[in-house]
Amino acid sequence: MTQGRPLLNRRLAEFGTTIFAEMSALAVRTGSINLGQGFPDTDGPEEIREAAVRALRDGHGNQYPPGPGIPELRTAIADHQQRRYGLAHDPDTEVLVTAGATEAIAASLLALLEPGDEVIAFEPFYDSYAACIAMAGGRRVPLTLRAPDFRPDLDALRDAITPRTRLLLLNSPHNPTGMVLTREELTTIAELAVEHDLLVVTDEVYEHLVFEGEHIPLISLPGMRDRTVSISSAGKTFSYTGWKVGWVTASAPLVAAVRTAKQYLTYVSAGPFQYAVAEALRLPDSYFDGFRADLRHKRDLLGEGLRAAGFDVYQPQGTYFITTDITPFGEKDAYAFCRALPERCGVVAVPNSVFYDDPDAGRSQVRFTFCKKEDVLREAAGRLGRLAP
Ligand code: PMP
Ligand code: GLN
């Protein structure tokens, strides 16, 4: 306290340490297998790491790169959107490189919201959404995705839109549930956005991790090209989560708005990694197919282990997370369960309950990541098997 006021301002008062930091610290402290925070235990392609080393050695990006990102990366992002989705973007005006998807989300909300604007998002939501909406002075309006399928209730979405609604914040493939929006769902969402003249920010960081169905960027649907801010990142796709290279693709006016905020957050993200990610985006389809096949196999492996251990398992269609329910163990409180798990069996997971505003909706849900080596997943499944419901 100073001047009789708390140091942390009112907008951020409800936010403490992120669950990912808390649970990863718990894993380190207890020497547990960390299936909590989503980061791979194996680095991505060797040639991409070498590209980063080469850039550092050759002095590419060691001084401030251009604010919007190096031209090579902006062009590679535009080419990726064209090749994968048939989307045309001008690399100079319609692509913006950011410090991970996290900064892209923050800059988008800071740029596009006025205080008091309502933002509709499906909960459970990725933890930075609530904090960034708060920092921008917006009001979050959660719509609950419910087990076992976590399909969005589009009638509820229609009902939630008010004259104060400015923006929809969507995430597909969805962390933590693994739900992937279908073309039909996206079409309805797009129609509502057009009807009510809404902006949409889409978090697509798991675009290359879809096991059932396909990833369809909302921006590709009729009426969405000029009202969608499409966000992705290299962290998940190339297994270099520490590099923090993300990007926005959108119309030139939207990119200009987001860039205005982004300039004063970081100005630019790390230069040499931008050169490496430009190469990564040009990897052949076989890389992306192999990555997805590997993770699909790991999803099935961990899913089987969790089922055998007694969890209710909600099969994810995408991402590298599995949401489970701990009710079969006679337990109801995911947070307490996750805090005790290292002691009980040497495994760390994340309670989904912290991703909901509705305290009842996800109370007994626990998330496990499967972006780990096979033997680590087998060992974790074996340890969890000792919990015995
Ligand atoms: N959105 C979602 C849904 C995520 O799971 C994550 C975590 N990687 C991010 C955004 C943040 O991505 P980045 O590490 O690129 O900032
Ligand atoms: N996206 C990662 C997850 O959901 C965590 C990233 C972070 O720690 N902020 O596990």
Image (spheres, grey):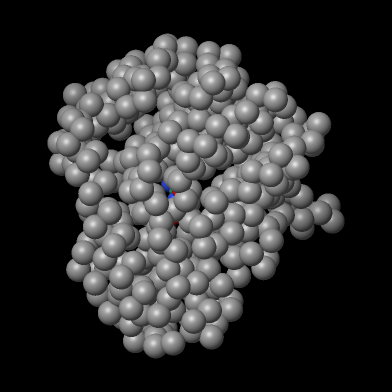
Viewer-closest of 166 and 350 = 166
The quarter in which the C terminus is drawn is bottom left
Instruction: From the viewer's perspective, tell me whether residue 159 is left or right of residue 328.
Output: right
User: What x and y, as percent, mark residue 358?
Assistant: 69, 61
The quarter in which the N terminus is drawn is bottom right
User: What x and y, as percent, mark residue 111?
Assistant: 64, 27
User: What x and y, as percent, mark residue 28?
Assistant: 37, 69
- State whether residue 46 is above or below residue 200: below
Figure disc tally: 0
Q: Examine the rendering and report whether any part of residue 230 can be seen.
A: yes
Which residue: 33% across, 48% down?
211
Asked which quadrant contains residue 16, the reply is bottom right
Asked which quadrant contains residue 197, the reply is top right
Which residue: 72% across, 27% down?
196
Q: Examine the rendering and report whether any part of residue 384 can be seen.
A: no
Asked which quadrant contains residue 237, the reply is top left
User: What x and y, as percent, mark residue 254?
Assistant: 57, 19
Viewer-closest of 116 and 261 = 116
Instruction: From the viewer's perspective, tell me whether residue 245 is left or right of residue 231.
Output: left
Q: Residue furthest right?
A: 4
Which residue: 23% across, 45% down?
291
